[in-house]
Amino acid sequence: MAKSRFEYVRTYEQDAILLPNTYIVIRLDGRGFHRFSAHYNFRKPNDKRALCLMNAAAKQVMRQIPDVAGAYGQSDEYSFVLSRECRMFDRREAKLVSTFASTFTAQYQFLWPEYFTGIRLDGNMLPSFDGRAVLYPSLREVRDYFSWRQADCHINNLYNTSFWTLVLTGGLSEQDAEQALMGTNSGEKNELLFSRFGINYNNEEIMYRKGTMLIRDVGADGSASESTESRDVREWHEKSKRQVEREEKKRRKAEIVELHVDIIGDEFWTGAGRWIS
């Protein structure tokens, strides 16, 4: 390609390269989704159509990007974890984050008619997602990250369930409902729901309470081994191109499994949770 005198401006481009041999978690969040959900009259406290749409978009991201080992979603957010061995875009942060955000946004818009039948997207109020990348040195931090997001799901959903029950069933204004819940703990919210409205929170749909975990079913030989955490940087660099391509092909073929389970306790991480390498 012929060069021009203007090409010097490329020297201003600086890539942030993410550290090798670390797990990459990319979290996407809906941009302005409070206004977005109000504009399209999302059901309160949970709109199953919207949550299923989020899950469907995340599955498409995983199908298109085999480097994703698993993902967790709740409300208007989704977190994708890439293995320590991921070399996608040479681990350039901007390329990774922008690709995930744009792919997820495109899939969300494309799949919208399947879940919101008869409701057309307004060109002045389109869904979009922003993202960030965070590095974690070991599986311990990755586990704690997902546990944090599920704990957040529980706290927010319990509050929203209590709040909107007071408004929609109890007849309170939104301001009065907020005042009624101010300073209450989880036990008090559970008691309020049961004593005043006969609602056992533990019987609410599990997807609302636990969020959604997506993993690839790659078979027994595709799960993590004891040596996963002990791999050093040298081994990470020496993995052959053929090995990488073979593993990528296997991940592409793997079924994506949707789970609504506790991911804070040990059972998930010693069983189904051994999906990450």
Image (tube, rainbow, N blue to C red):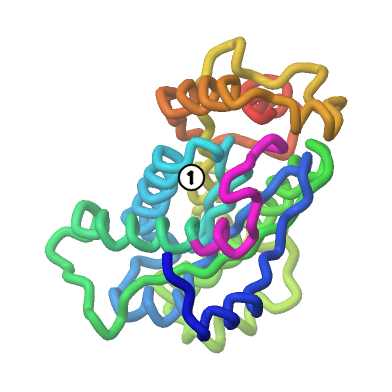
**Is 47 or 271 nearer to us in this picture?**
271
**Is 214 or 99 nearer to us in this picture?**
99
Q: On the rendered structure, is 72 left or right of 173?
A: right
**Is 67 or 119 nearer to us in this picture?**
67
Residue drawn at x 53%, y 79% is: 7
Q: Position of residue 159 (x, y in %)?
A: 60, 66
Q: Position of residue 239 (x, y in %)?
A: 69, 25
Q: Is residue 78 above or below residue 140?
A: below
Residue drawn at x 36%, y 58% is: 50
Disc 1 crowd, CA 10 A, few/some/many (<14, 14-19, 20+): some
Magenta span of residues: 83-98
Q: Is residue 182 above or below residue 105?
A: below
**Quadrant of the frame with the C terminus:** top right
Q: Secondary structure at mark 1?
A: helix
Query: Residue beneath label 1, please?
Result: 207
Q: Is residue 62 above or below residue 11?
A: above
**Quadrant of the frame with the N terminus:** bottom left
Q: Is residue 197 visible?
A: no
**Is 71 or 115 nearer to us in this picture?**
71
Is 91 contained in the magenta span?
yes
